[in-house]
Image: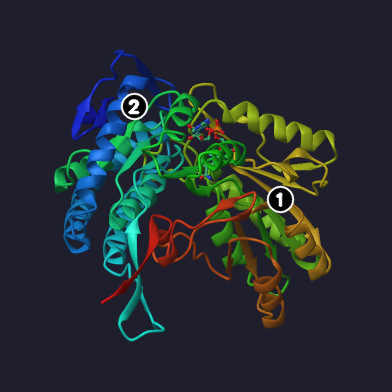
Amino acid sequence: MTAWQNTLLFIDGSWRAGAAGETIPVLNPANERQIGTVAKATNVDLDEALAAVARGFAAWRRVSAWDRAVIMRKAACLLRERVDEIAVTMVHENGKPLAQAEGETLLGADIIDWFANEGLRAYGQIIPPRAPDVVQMTFKVPVGPVAAFTPWNFPINQAIRKIAAALAAGCAIIIKGPEETPASVAALVACFADSGVPAGVLNLVFGTPSDISQYLVPHPVIRKVSFTGSTAVGKHLAALAGAHMKRITMELGGHAPVIVAADVNLDSTVQQIATHKFRNAGQTCVSPTRFLVEGAMAEKFTSRFVDFARKLKVGSGLERETDMGPLANERRIPALEALISDALAKGATLATGGKRIGNAGWFFEPTVLIDVPIETRIMNEEPFGPIAVINRFETIDAAISEANRLSYGLAAYAYTNNPSISARLRAEVESGMITINHLGFALPEVPFGGIKDSGFGTEGGSEAIEAYLESRFVTQKS
Ligand code: NAD
């Protein structure tokens, strides 16, 4: 932990304090003690980052895709080599169990490798001309300097999807990292700095999020904005970017439905989806939230799910036997309590959990609410915490209609052995991603993104790099 206790800004290839010397405390969510500070950027620092990213872009765009990939692969190797130290750092500042922090870090290395290779395949086109002495072609050019804003729930994963796609495409980037979990992101950035990414290509700042976005997004140097976070903030930033004609990628909130048909294996289904529900203490944009279980199965499913939730070991992420750590920040506790009390007041039943655990550290009980009316807040707002809502359905039409009722459309889950039901779900559920009979999201090579109020664009798969590229058309007569 010592190497990263006080996180600095990384601008133009050097680690530095903010120009005003101000810092923000960083707290350990498992015990609420201060573990360090993070430097706070002012507009003076942002001006330096903007000048650096412009110079960095001018240099990096001239580096061949092949040479960029060599440097990026070195960063991936360093990330793998440093996984133990980085994972412990992440647990200290985010609270998640160590195995999840290790998995996130190693997946980050795979994402770097995948985008490094994808940069080699940024192909253009030759378009048949109307005259024999004309050549018509398109080729891909990097969009320009990027401003990216990443959250605290997956400190490495959310940042690396933006950094890797941008660098592979030949863009330079300023990341505004999460003030709650700054050292994990700084450790990631250090892997790139140590692998030979030139000064100015990758810059890292922290501070007051709204001040930084208000300054960077409209700035003429910035050509592309990428944000991961809540729908409300995403809409605000998308509007700001639109007013200044900037390209955007928005990875926002969700309220994932889980449709469980009565014909599935109960044990394996509950084991898989309940594990996924409580991963990262439910603070996941794709977290399964509205469980819609076919009537004949509902009672048994609920009872197994509740047993599973009660047996989870909640505690410090540093202990190997811990299943679920604390919430990552204090403000989630009143937010979850308010959702639960609203649901109970409107007729829902609390099957288990519902309260904060202890009073040191932001631990919260794995919680299951059943028979929850649709007019409750929790059926409409993203809980972003360890709360599952279980309701029953009688017809597949009713389940699909409930799945599609909200303006969110990020992830959806389904379990069924009936091919005609899965065909309907694939076609009719309104979400950017659906995984049926297994968990298959978030691999580097597959799309990751939402529709409707859940966002715009994808951060995985071959389309993700397109968000950082422009097609330039050239027609030439010999
Ligand atoms: P929040 O809305 O205050 O912040 C969410 C994220 O956006 C944070 O990282 C924050 O630093 C950033 N942010 C906030 N205002 C900003 C601005 N004006 N400009 C730039 N960045 C800004 O919420 P929170 O309490 O930190 O998190 C809870 C909510 O955020 C959840 O309900 C969830 O919807 C959302 N969230 C989503 C993801 C995701 O993976 N999609 C991750 C974290 C948080």
Return the residue found at the far bottom.
132
Indicate the position of residue 206 as horizontal and vertical percent values. Answer: 37, 28
Nearest the viewer among 464 and 435 is 464
User: Does 427 sit left or right of 167 as displayed?
Assistant: right
Tell me which corner region of the image, top left, top right, bottom left or bottom right, holds residue 73.
bottom left
The amino acid pointed to by label 2 is: Leu
Discs 2/1, front: 2
Indicate the position of residue 201 as horizontal and vertical percent values. Answer: 24, 43
Q: CA distance from mark 2 to mark 1?
A: 35 Å
The residue sitting at 41% across, 43% down in the picture is 97
Q: Earlier in the sequence, mark 2 or mark 1?
A: 2
Nearest the viewer among 437 and 142 is 142
Indicate the position of residue 392 as horizontal and vertical percent values. Answer: 79, 59
Numbered disc 1: secondary structure: loop
Q: Is mark 1 within 8 Å of ligand 1?
A: no
Nearest the viewer among 230 and 146 is 146
Total marks placed: 2
Is the C-beta separation of discs 2 and 1 under 8 Å? no
Q: Which residue is mark 2?
A: 46
The amino acid pointed to by label 1 is: Ser
Q: Which residue is mark 1?
A: 407
Res. 305 visible in picture = yes
Quarter of the image that includes the C terminus = bottom left
Considering only vertical position in the picture, is 393 above or below 256? below
Numbered disc 2: secondary structure: helix
Mark 1 residue crowding within 10 angstroms, few (<14) / some (14–19) / many (20+) = some
